[in-house]
Every structure is written in C-alpha cells, then in structure tokens.
Amino acid sequence: MATLVCSLIIFTAKAEDKTVDIADFAKYRRADDAAPMIRVAIAYCKQIRATKLIFPKATYYFKRDLAAEKYVFMSNNDEGLKRFVFDLSGMENLEIDGQGSKFILTGFLSPFLLENCRNISLRNFSIDYVRTFHSEAKILSVDKSGMTVQFDRKFPYKLDHQTLIFTDSAGVVYPWSDLLEFDPLKKETAFMANDLWVGSNVPVKEIKPGTVKLLLPQITGIPGNVMVFASAFRLVPAFNISGSVNISFSGIDIFHCGGMGIVAQNSRDLFLDHVRVTPSPGSGRIVSITADATHFSNCSGKITIENCLFENQKDDATNIHGIYSKITRINTPYEIEVELVHKQQFGFEYLKPDMKVEFADATSIVTYANNSVKSTERINKEFTRVVFADPISPNTKLGDVIACSTDYPEVLIRNCVIRGNRARGILLNSRGKTVVEHNTFHVPGAAILFEGDASFWFEQSGVNGVTIRNNTFDNCNYGVWGNACIQVGSGILKRVRSKSRYHKDISIVGNTFKIFDPRIINAYCVDGLIFKDNKIEQSEAYRSNFSDGKAFVIDACSNVSIDGYDIRNAVDHVKK
Amino acid sequence: MATLVCSLIIFTAKAEDKTVDIADFAKYRRADDAAPMIRVAIAYCKQIRATKLIFPKATYYFKRDLAAEKYVFMSNNDEGLKRFVFDLSGMENLEIDGQGSKFILTGFLSPFLLENCRNISLRNFSIDYVRTFHSEAKILSVDKSGMTVQFDRKFPYKLDHQTLIFTDSAGVVYPWSDLLEFDPLKKETAFMANDLWVGSNVPVKEIKPGTVKLLLPQITGIPGNVMVFASAFRLVPAFNISGSVNISFSGIDIFHCGGMGIVAQNSRDLFLDHVRVTPSPGSGRIVSITADATHFSNCSGKITIENCLFENQKDDATNIHGIYSKITRINTPYEIEVELVHKQQFGFEYLKPDMKVEFADATSIVTYANNSVKSTERINKEFTRVVFADPISPNTKLGDVIACSTDYPEVLIRNCVIRGNRARGILLNSRGKTVVEHNTFHVPGAAILFEGDASFWFEQSGVNGVTIRNNTFDNCNYGVWGNACIQVGSGILKRVRSKSRYHKDISIVGNTFKIFDPRIINAYCVDGLIFKDNKIEQSEAYRSNFSDGKAFVIDACSNVSIDGYDIRNAVDHVKK
C-alpha cells in the first residue's frame, strides 16, 4: 500500500494495477478549476509509480491560476514561461485514459508537458478552449475604404483608440497579427486567398457592437466568407514533448489550442492513432487549431501517424525535420560558435557530447564534412560554443551550418485525412525510411513538400527513401502555398542546384491524382524519382489559375522515371 | 599562479593581489561588442577567486548577442528571460573598478546581475545606452485635434498604419505606454503635469519626417516643453541584486537604463556613495532612467545612501519596503495558500523555513497574529503553499495578508540631492531605524512618503523610528503626486483608521521648508509625530493650486507634537 501525505490527507492506491482514479482527488478541485486536482493527482502518481490515471467520463474545466509553470522552448512555437495542466515531466510507464472526457481550458494554459518522459500513453479525451486564440468574423461587405465584418460574441473584442484588441470575459488580451479568408461552405481557405500580413494596428471603426469596419483600402474578400484573425504567437501548443521516448496518442481530439497540436523535439518513438484536429463540433468555427497539427524536430526512432484527421488548422498537418545551426565564429581548429537563427528555434538544445554532426554549405546545403561533438557550452538561447573530437574541416567557413547527422526517424503516415487547413499537407524531411500510404489530401498548397534550407527556417531535410503510395490527392493547390501536388521546396539557390542531389529515392506509386490544376510534380535536386502506376483524374472542382502549367517540372535531378503518363508536353526538363 | 584553460588560451594572474586587468582579455572583444570579453573575464575571476577586476579608462560598448542569459524576477520591475553583461552570480569578495570608464549598451541588455553575491564593490564607471528605452519630443503646437511634436533623430520611430512605434537602427522595437510633459528650462516635470495613460495605439499622423501629430483631441501641453513617451516595461534595470550581502557602489553614474537604477531584493547591507542618476551629459535629454533611481524589497542589515544625486528619473528616488502576500485559501489549521498580487512582484520568493511572519487584516493592515514558516511549496510565480510551525490564528480569513516580520533594514539617507524626477522623493517603509539628513528635495510630489498597503501595491511598511533632520525641502509638490511635503499614503481605509497606528515615531527636526504651497505634513495612523525646530520659508517659485490648503493635516494619530509654527489655522485635526 503506497501512501502519500499530501496536505495532510492520506490517499491509498490499489497495489496490483496501480490505477489511480482522478475521482479520488475531487476535493482538490476548485469551484470552476480542476487544475489543482490534476496537480495533486500527478504528484501522487509520481510517488506511487502509478501505471494508469483514469478520468470518469465528464467535462473538466481548467484555469491557469494554480497550474504548473515552466519556461519552455518548444521548436517552431514561441518560447515562454508557461502554465501546464498536466506536467508529466520525468514520468514513466503511465497511461492516462480520459474515457471520453472533455478537457476545456481557459486562457494561456497548455494541457500537456512531457519532458524526459518514457512510455506514456494518452487516450480518449478531447481538448478545447473557452475562448480561442484566434478570432473569426463573417465578411459583410467590401468597398473602396475597407471591409466590414461581423463577430460572433464568442470572439469578444474591444477598441483601443482605432485599433482592434481581442479579449475574453476576464479581460485577457489575445494578440493577433494577420488575416486569412476562409470559405465556410467548402470548409477550407478561400480559393487562392493569401495571408494578409497587416499587423494588429489596422485602423478600424465600429459600426455597431460586433460589427467592425477594417479601414484597409486595398483589402478584398467575398461577403459571406469568414475572415480569420490569426493568433500572433504560438505560445500554447496542446502537447509539448521534449527529450521523451515512446509516447503514444490514441482517440485524442484536439479541437483547439494556441500553437501546434502535438509537437515533439529531441524525442524518440512517437505514435499517433486516431488523433483528430478539427474545429469543436457545434462551435460553428471554421478554424481548428492555430498552427501545425503535428510537428517533429530532431526526433528519432519511429514516428507513426495513422487513422488521423487533420483539418482546418492554421498550418501544415505535419513537418518532420532536423535543425541546422549557423557557424558564426571559428575559435580554434577544434572549436566553433554556432547560432540558432530562426526565432522559434531559440533555446533548442540538440548538440550533445558524442553526437555525429554534418557540416554543410548554406547555399547548396551540400554536406562537405562530418565530425563528432566533444563538448558544448550554451552561451544563451541563441549561441552555443561547440568543441569537436577531430579538427574541423579546413573548408569550414562562417555562415555554413551544422546539424545532427544520425538517428533520423522512420516515418509512417497511413490512412489519414488532411484537408481544409492553411498551407501544405505534410512536410517530409526525415532521412529515415518514410512511407506515406492510403491518405487523402485536400489542401490549398502542396500535399507533400520536401523542404530544408540553411537560410530562413534552418530546417534540415534531404530525404533518403520515401514511398508515396495508394494515396488520393483530391484537388490540392487551390491556394497559394505550392506549385504542384508533390513539390520540392528546399532553399537551394538555382545557380548551385546542379551540384546538389539533396533528396534521394522518392517513389510515387499507385496514387490517384484528382486535378483541376495540371501541376503534379515540381522537383529539383533529387536523385531517384519514380512516378509509376498513378491514376490521374481531371476535375472541374475549381478553375485553375495555372491551366497552362506543366504536370512535371523537374530540374537538376538524376535517375528520374515517369511512367504511365504522357509526359511529352508535361515535363519541363529532366536531367538524368 | 592560478591558471585557466579557456578556449585553449592560458591566462595568468598576479598571485598576491589577484587583480585581473580586463585589457588581458582584449582578444575576446568582438568588433563592436565587449560583452564576450566580460564573459570570459568573469569566468576567469571566478576560477581564480580574483579580488579585483580593473578596466583601463575607456569607452566599452556592449551588445546583447553573446551576453549571459537568465530568467529574472526582479521586484517592482518586469520579469523576463534577460541578458546581462556582468553576471556576477555566486561571486564573493570582488571589486570592479571602472577607473572612470564608460559602459555603453545597446538594446534590451542589463549591465549587472548579482544573485547570491557577497562583498562586491562596484566603482568608478558610468552606464549609458545608445538608444533610450523611452523617447522624447518637443511640443510644437496644440490644437483642438491634437498635439504636434518633433523627435530628435536619436529617438527613431516608424509608423504602422496610424500608430507610432519606437525603434532603433537595428529595427528593435521599444514599446511605449503613456505620456508625461516635462519643462526643459526647469529640468523637471511640467507644473501639475499628469501621466497620460493613453496607450501606444494613439492614432498619429506624420507631418514630415520627425514631426508627428498625436490625434488626441483632449490633450493639453505647452509648446516648447518636452513630451516624454514612457517605456512600457521595466525590463532592463541597471543593477539587479538578489539574495546578496554587502554590496557597495561608489562613483557610479547611471545615465540611462530601462527600469530601475539599483534594485535589490532579499539582500543585506547595501551601500551607495556618490551614485548619480542623471541624464547623459551633453545628450540634451530631459529624462535620465525610466523608473525609480533605487528600490529595496525585503532587504535587511543596513541600507546607506550617501552623497547621491537622483534627478530626472521617471519615478521615485527610492522605496524601501517589504512585500505582503494575500491569503487565498486556508488548507488546514497549519497550512495556507498565498498569492503575490502585483504583477511586478510575481516570482518574488521571500518565504523561507523558520522565517517569522505577521498576519494582517487587508483593510486596516493591522497585524493580528504572528507565526513561523515550517515549509513552503511554490506552485507557480503567483501562488505558494505555506505550512506554519504553529496553528494559524483562528482570526485568519481569506484576503488577509502575510509578510516577513523581522530583519527590517536600518536606513540612512544623507547628503543627497533629489530633484526633477516624476512622482515622489523617497518612500520610507522600513521598520528599522531610519535617518534622513542633510538632503535636498525638489520633487513634484511628496518629498517623503510613508506608504504600505494590502490592496494595490502590497508593499509592507509601518515605520518604527524615523528621524528626518536638517534637510531642505525646496518647493516640492509642484506636481500631482502628493498632498504635502511629508505625507502618509498608506492604503488604510478611512473608516478603519482610528483602529490603526500603522506608523510609529516620526521625528521631523531642524529642516528647512521652502514652500509655495502651504501643505507641509499630511499624516494618519501615526503614533508619535514630532515636528520641531523647522524653518518655514515662503516662496513664490510657483503659484499654488492649493493656496488654502492646511499646513498640517493630521488624522487618527496619537502623540503628535508640532512646535515652532503657528498651527492654529494650520492643523486640520489632531487626535492624541
């Protein structure tokens, strides 16, 4: 019998299965806030090494007042001193089963933090927020002086002089930064709508309570469509995973959060099954979450995403990549100083003793040397001093980049539906074996993008064996975030592309492409590209702005094979 | 001979005096940034336990890129993940002598952090910034639609739609929040000028580069005066001191910083001699630093401030106080939960095992019980669980406050000049012996304020032996921040004042009051107030808005003695 003296109350657990029932902690629930109850229950689970924490099916409301707090740098989201309902840091061998419960949060509060966890399984609950981090308004009219929009009362706002400030019933401010138009009938971004980076200082005039005119003379939009006011920051991802191993999700609905849905860094073996990112049922909202559905930085082992639905989130469905650091100083023959360049990578610590790293030229992203880390000293969240085991290559120059060069994850994305979100479908950037099969894509940009650059995002890519089979590409590219269904978008300058075969062995087999836009593949710097046994179905779902586009645009590639399609007028140029 | 392998370079120090010369670290200076050099030198000083670090007299420029980083909660300033040039944390027995050097910083970078230091002496240097955290503009004209102002190019700005955003040459944004008018001829806040809490979203129109009209129909101001655009945050104090003992400053000029000049918390024995807070000579600026010149929270031992000049800072010259936490929950007969209420006190950790604490009613601030801390658990930066050695008083109720009830500092403020700053002179709130002598005050509010409240600032006061002698009060109260030269401003509701004698034994002897405004003393809840042998000189420096004010307004006091002044028509009411 494990016991815990906690605020002078003694709990008991069943000795065999070590299942803890949250109902036993009900006395720690405050009137409208179950977060203190979770805090006590988690401490107890830690103490008795509980194997399972179960929630009687119910709706649980969480506030930030008494939640756990930690300064968190989470890759591709915004850093900060944050609050978490479930801080599972350091825990092992625990299953949390919501049994169909609803977790409803208020304000800048993340549901889950998993730092240095092992064997954690999260099951059967949904995440939602009382007030969303973005706001939505119906477009009423557009004229020469601007656009008039109408907010539902679930997106409260106030005016400060002539500017629009989103708020909640407690007066908390929800900063916004840009606009994007959505089509509520099609439940997707409006045809060819682009992000309007207008900033939050747009002058506005309130016509009547709830109805506001944006005084932007150049703005366009279709009355009846929904204008989405984007959250300015990604401070509140739903699941924050760092330095963890074997984390699985099943039956999780993420109806809303203020950042990415599931984001993992420096972690191994991540399994998603029946995870749904979708707007809260009955909410009438067009947008689900405010950034990528999932995202994986410098992860390893296996990443499996199966039977998931990712729709209407404000960014890609997934992106699986490494991170490059820029060389800012060569101190000695063994020592350099490196910088994390992108603001949302600040504080990302991945360089560890004995780690194998590659040195790459920033312009071509061609790897020219390898080495092994001996020691590191973090100067601050941007700069790190790195000492290597061997002398650094004499070719090393300032501006080059380094990245981890081993432990790329195997990726399996199967039987998922990705649709209606902003931007792209999936960004495949792991050098591990990658299989994408039986998915359906209906996204406004490229369905599949191979990225990587050492100039803006500093995300390491360079795939090495990708199989894309038996998927349906259902009228993608109805927006501005791509130039083909399957696309290479790596930051390799044209003039050096001939030197680079950054990506290797991409096989596209047995898929169905329903296309209103002729552009199927746009690739460069690929060695080994097979396009075989795919079905192309012409569609009139939209009227293409690119009706004279080429089906296949291939530049600076080797070993390209495109079968079963008349490529005489389609391929731009193929270099074998 | 102490040696340090640092980036493969070997330094040597003189064995006897352990003096380190920063000149020996010149190779670590970057082109325009000496911060990396300081970082290496400090590490070396730590390693060899240097007794002195000297700077050849020169101008040293510091940038934030490679500076040390730490998340810092500094009482009465704004918390954050911050950068520091000199992170002396954990160091002992060190003197840093600038030998007349100028330290010039760029951006959000504090010069000094002293956490858990002992016996540190800082001497002979000045602190300034390339771009100030506030901005100043000359008022050109005022009409019905607003005010036209002209910025010198040292306060660069940009417009975002119709809002004004201050910036620097690197594009860094310097947020602003409110306005205050200064008189450049008198070098002080304009007569009876008040803070204009207009926020930074004021609509503006650029008349021509550098000249901007604030479209605020109600605004008033005098052409030729200077409008100061206040820094929105106090993120960058000059000297941040926490948990330290015996820290002394001499010959330090703080020409600018973005927060308080010298702020200490939970520290003991702090000595300031010849510290000057004043606008950079030759800068043409009206404002020195953006907040209080000095500030001390929950400090102990001795605080001595001698031969100092505090002028033109954007807040008080000093405030020496404790901090109250609010009781939000009574968990058990031994355990409560408390909250730090004021945003700028978040994260302030002062409750420690064995600390004696008082329990006080929030309305009257009357102490009704004492106890001793057994243990604490920090929930987050706002809430802490506290377990006491003895059962808590049955009178304890939610909303009451607790505070440390021992170790109040002895205070000596001598031979200082305090003038031209916003708000008050000195806020005396220590229960230790306090002597204020031979100072000159020329401030727009009360020269001396006794504060303390458990409702807004949550600052503990309740003085117990204050001698104010041989000072000159030179035409104070030319602004809006006071109702007498020497004033009680404690947050004790009128209806409960009769029950409270919060302050004890205040003796005002041998001072000279030059007054254009008749209001000399305004006091309540004082037991023991002596006013004796003071010289009152009538002045026509300003025309008082309060010419029919009483010289002495005394309410709910005991043992009051006012000598040498005709009080028949002056005293409002005295309760003995």
Image (cartoon, coloured by chain):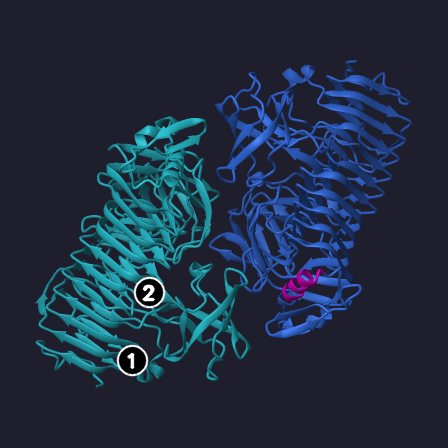
Chain colours: A blue, B cyan
Q: How many marks?
A: 2
Under tag 1, what secondary structure?
Answer: loop
Magenta span: predominant SS is helix
What amino acid does circle 1 point to? Arg
The label shown at residue B501 is 1
Residue numbers of the magenta segment: A39-49
Residue B33 lies, in percent from the top left, at 38, 31
Q: Chain of mark 2?
A: B
The label shown at residue A482 is none
Under tag 2, what secondary structure?
Answer: strand
Residue B121 lies, in percent from the top left, at 27, 47
Vertical comparison of A565 with A193: above or below: above
Decide which of A237, B207 is in the foreground and name it.
Answer: A237
Decide which of B367, A132 is in the foreground and name it.
Answer: B367
What amino acid does circle 2 point to? His
* Quarter residue A502 falls in: top right
Q: CA distance from mark 2 to mark 1?
A: 17 Å
Of callouts 2 and 1, which one flags the residue occurring earlier in the amino acid sequence? 2
Q: Are marks 2 and 1 in contact (CB under 8 Å)?
A: no
Q: Is residue B475 left or right of residue B526?
A: left
* Quarter residue A569 falls in: top right
Residue at the disc numbered 2: B321
Q: Is residue A519 visible?
A: no
